[in-house]
């Protein structure tokens, strides 16, 4: 577990912390008026939400990425169902009382399903793109540098339909950095 904490992106963590502190300071200064209003304590509610968010982040950090990947289609299906339900029985709120963007049961507003749908779409796209990347063989060398120009120009040939039509299997010699090869520029194994 400690090794996972060492892998955290420290500049990103610092930026998130700085933005959260700046937001708290802004809310605190907005509430400092001569006339006491509900705005004077809004920074405390924001601090509670930040604490709840930190707990959720910690729980997500402890969750296995494989479990999250497994749960993504179910989460996506629930989000789509809630969006469709909102079209049928949605209610408005506040100044947007005419819009149907909230779900309410017995007068209790449960929230906007669009917020859950944003997260579900992000996770589903990540799952789909990861699946595409695992099906596409690597091109060029095994190093993390950008692929050569000829490999970028012929990545379109790495589609499953091209590989099914291709009679010859791709090899490391097809991934030369010279002119575009006649065979697909896809390497399924690192060059030796």
Image: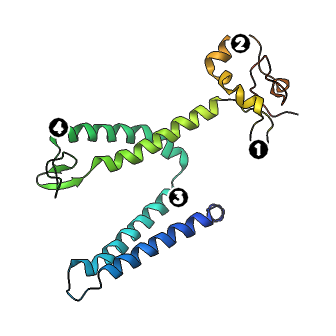
* The C terminus lies in quadrant: top right
Spatial separation of the CA atoms under disc 1 and disc 3 = 29 Å
Asked if labels 3 and 1 touch by Cβ distance under 8 angstroms, the answer is: no
Spatial separation of the CA atoms under disc 4 and disc 3 = 36 Å
Residue 25 % position (x, y): 40, 79
Badge nearest the viewer, 4 or 1: 1
Spatial separation of the CA atoms under disc 2 and disc 3 = 43 Å
| Mark 1 vs 3, N-terminal side | 3
Residue occupied by mark 3:
61
Is the residue 20 above or below the residue 71 in the image? below
Residue 152 appears in the figure: yes
What number is the disc on residue 145? 1
Badge nearest the viewer, 2 or 1: 1
**Badge 3 local density, few (<14 within 10 Å), some, or many (20+)?**
few
SS for callout 3: helix
**Badge 1 local density, few (<14 within 10 Å), some, or many (20+)?**
few
Residue occupied by mark 2:
166
Question: Where on the picture, by quarter, is residue 108?
Answer: bottom left
Spatial separation of the CA atoms under disc 2 and disc 4 = 50 Å
SS for callout 4: helix
**In the foreground, 38 or 135:** 38
**In the foreground, 56 or 23:** 23
| Mark 2 vs 3, N-terminal side | 3
């Amino acid at each position: 577990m400690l090794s996972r904490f060492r892998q955290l992106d420290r500049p990103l963590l610092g930026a998130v912390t700085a933005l959260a502190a700046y937001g708290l300071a802004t809310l605190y200064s907005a509430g400092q008026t001569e006339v006491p209003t509900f705005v004077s304590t809004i920074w405390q509610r924001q601090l509670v939400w930040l604490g709840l968010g930190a707990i959720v982040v910690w729980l997500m950090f402890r969750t296995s990425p494989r479990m999250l990947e497994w749960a993504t289609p179910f989460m996506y299906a629930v989000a789509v169902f809630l969006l469709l339900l909102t079209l049928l029985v949605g209610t408005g709120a506040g100044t947007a009382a005419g819009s149907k963007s909230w779900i309410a049961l017995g007068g209790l507003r449960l929230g906007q399903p669009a917020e859950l749908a944003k997260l579900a779409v992000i996770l589903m796209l990540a799952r789909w793109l990861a699946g595409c990347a695992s099906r596409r063989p690597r091109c060029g060398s095994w190093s993390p540098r950008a692929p050569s120009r000829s490999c970028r120009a012929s990545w379109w040939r790495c589609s499953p339909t091209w590989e099914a039509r291709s009679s010859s299997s791709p090899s490391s010699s097809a991934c030369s950095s010279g002119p575009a090869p006649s065979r697909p520029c896809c390497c399924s194994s690192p060059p030796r």
